[in-house]
Image (cartoon, helix red, strand yellow):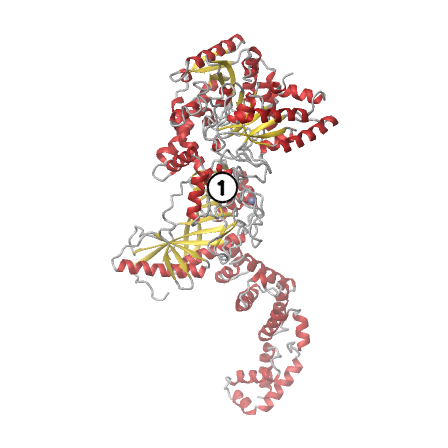
Amino acid sequence: MKHPPPSRYESVIGLEVHAQMRTRSKIFCGCPNQFGAVANSQICPVCAAFPGVLPVLNREAVNMAIKTGLAIHGQLRLFSEFSRKNYFYPDLPAGYQISQYELPIVEQGHLMIDSPTDKTSKRIGITRIHMEVDAGKSLHEGILGASWVDLNRTGTPLMEIVSEPDLRSSAEAGEYLKKLRAIVRYLEVCDGNMEEGSFRCDANVSVRLRGTTTLGTRCELKNLNSIRNVMRAIDYEVERQIELVEHGEQVVQESRLWNADLNSSRSMRGKEDAHDYRYFPEPDLPPLRITPERIEAVAQTMPELPEAKSVRFQTQYQLSAYDAGVLTSSRELADYFEAVAQHTADLGHPNPKAAANWVTVELCGRLNRDNREIQHTPIPAHRLGQLLAMIQRGTLSGKMAKEIFEILFTDGGDPEQIVRQQGLQQVTDQDAIVQVIEQVLDAHPEDVGLYLAGKTKVFGFLVGQIMKASQGKANPALVNQLLQSQLLKRG
Amino acid sequence: MELSRLSLAHAADLLRKRSLSSVELTRFFLTRIEQKNPELNAYITVDEEGALAAAQAADARLARGDGTPLTGLPLAVKDLFCTHGLRTTCASKMLHTFCPPYESTVTRRLKEAGAVLLGKTNMDEFAMGSSNETSFFGPARNPWNPARTPGGSSGGSAVAVAAGLCLAAIGTDTGGSIRQPAAMTGITGLKPTYGRISRFGMIAFASSLDQAGPMTRSVADAALLLQSMAGHDPLDSTSIDAVVPSYAEALTAHVQGLRIGIPAEYFAEGLTDAVRDAVERAITTFRALGAQCIPLSLPSTPYAIPTYYVIAPAEASSNLARYDGVRFGYRCENPKDLQDMYARSRAEGFGAEVKRRIMLGTYVLSSGYYDAYYRKAQKVRRLIADDFQTALAQVDLLLTPTTPETAFLIGEKNNDPVRMYLSDIFTINVNLAGLPAISLPCGFDANSLPIGLQLIGRPLQESTLLTAGQAFQQATDWHLRSPV
Ligand SMILES: [Zn+2]
């Protein structure tokens, strides 16, 4: 944020997330639910809304919506219905979008987030989750005076997850999105990829004077294709609205299109707001009835969710809340950590805290530098586990371990073998270390004298000289211990 | 032997005995269509090649002795059932060259049962009309008097059956579109329970009301066709997943002790004397057969027309949005831009009645009007259904006239849509309630025009309708009268 808003204003933010569900087939026909295929190759008469064809609801999509509803502690409606949202657009073949409108499958859920603003845990209400169908894509490039339509995406099942206007800053919005995205990824109902549009977010933003309770006029921000953009667009919008209010002007309710390159948004008025969607219940689909038994069966398939996992990590591995939070931010990262911890334990040197450190600091840091996700780590968990066990065993110093780590990251391989090949093994042979100590002490008689006269500060200097003389291979703990006794011998 | 009046069972028997081949029978109808269709305009498309190929295949099966109930029987279907590779127009300029790349469940099941499809019959454009006059291909004409309409919207199917241009036909009924033309052409028309027959591949007019059904020269024929078409279809989520009983068995049951309700509201103002007299004579016939006829009331009856003309156009306005010139169907010449393409393709591709209903439907769904029209209509629809449920708890069937009057002149009601809509006043409520009903020939007026009576049953009780209908046709010969 360039200028922090004057503190007498408060921003009120609600998010609408469209999550594409990772079902095998589309929501209303048997076509594969896949991306990246040749245009219009993944379609059938239902996708293209040919005359007389009918939608058939995909059970897997319903189960995914149930799963998500359970994960956000929502109320599941045993009776929900689909409606038609009518409007003309070439990438909407039927002339209507089938969407749950009056009776959505999930209502009244919530998520807990750690508010970066208040430094507290905060409950963010989720008004509803409803199922709907994605539209195709219009492509306006290529030929002059015409457009192409690709219907491959038509029929992709979507969940629209609508939050309450409970968020008070762009940072909270970012936190909420991260949490929600982690959940849909944990559940494997959505891949959460904002850049590719499988997890899309619109933000409703308004401002009001702090202490007031009525909501200001809101604007809807669109085209936010990363969490960073969501946050930037909110900051821009909050500033824009405050400026308007400060100048005694009115905020106009409208949709605004975010332009990440220009770092600003522009009004979409006249395009979106003129629509009367003429919603009415979809007569081709009977109301959706789900049974408590079905909900229970879906609940049985739920994986451990981030919050529960974090609590378990704190008790089972004695991790800090922070580390547990970082490690459980994605299922893959949590699984990786657990595999590393398990492997070091199997090698007889359990140290989950060290494992957590190495995973969150070294590995994640290194992956970040390469812009890689944990799924694409070049170091398999058992190799990192091996490395950690070697540190525990005292075979490697922390410094050496980092060198091996870098080799593992760039070239791969077995850490034991690398150590042997590079001669990096830590020297734990007492006689060898004593020999080096003797040489160093002989070379520094004044310092020995100073030490014996009570100037113990030189001890650190001597350790450094010994480590240097051993090319860093001497076990530092042993050096400390043996230097002490060798110095005393000279007293 | 008059081939043009053969019953399905009789024809099937002749084919099985090899005293007649399917090719012979098919050629007979193709020739007859060639002679009579120019005047009657019953068919939009005649599929001579496809029909003869199917007939040959049927003869081969029959020769092997493994015929199914409909093997080799030449039928006609309304031109809104999608037929793979065969033009399906919905009698609209919008689809006048449309060739579906898929098959409707109804035609698929008929073909699987062995039927030979002669062609696609004329109808009101998108099934919107009560006289077959809104067809892009011109009106079908009533064989009893070609100056008159055969009713609609399944007018072409009715004409083809009445005039012997097929053994039997399939129609669809959204507000009376099977029963009203059946009554006006002196044939039997059955609208099954909503959901009894799959709507997949049947071009939609009003999804919550549309239902396919047989149009035949006898109740026995209707039973046979219903048997082949009924049953759940995974491609239609609104089709009912219930066991399909043997309808042939229903034909052998008795009407002794059957309770038939006579709703007073159907014998009120607007009903012509000729129709009233014929229907009252039919009531006497049922009494004579041992049925009990009980007067009762369906007080919500007067609300049916306004309710229907909110709900059906609302659904139609949305169902017909897909005809936008983008992927199939008519596209205007040289569109300036997208908006122009939408506007002109639809303005040029749809006829006046279709546009009227799209506008009506768009209006009643608009914000600010939704509650006053669409939502209220849905509530009234529920009241109408409740009324029927109450009545049908006391009786097994209801008996009414099918239409208030006999076939009217072509052009007579063209400029007065509301008068035209009243033609369906006795049939529309049945669609709103989703019930099964059948129209049976029960007499003629002074102009020798046929009169129909309607029997209305409980949900999924088509068998009761067939039992009563069969008993009536065994006691009368109205259904055997032929216009040609
Ligand atoms: Zn498809």
Dividing the picture into quadrants, the one containing residue A100 is: top left
Query: Is residue A250 at least partly visible in the picture?
Result: yes
Q: Quadrant of the C terminus of chain B?
A: top right
Q: In this view, does A423 lie above or below A347?
A: below
Q: Quadrant of the N terminus of chain B?
A: top right
SS at mark 1? loop
Looking at the picture, tell me which residue is in the foreground, B258 or B373: B373
- Residue A319 in picture, x, y percent from top left: 52, 62
Q: Mark 1 lies on which chain?
A: B
What's under tag 1, amino acid-wise? Answer: Tyr
- Residue A395 in picture, x, y percent from top left: 64, 73
- Residue B216 in picture, x, y percent from top left: 57, 22
Looking at the picture, tell me which residue is in the foreground, A454 or A160: A160
Residue occupying image coordinates x 51% and y 17%: B396
- Residue B331 in picture, x, y percent from top left: 48, 44
User: To which residue does mark 1 refer?
Assistant: B330
Q: In which quarter of the image is ligand 1?
A: top right
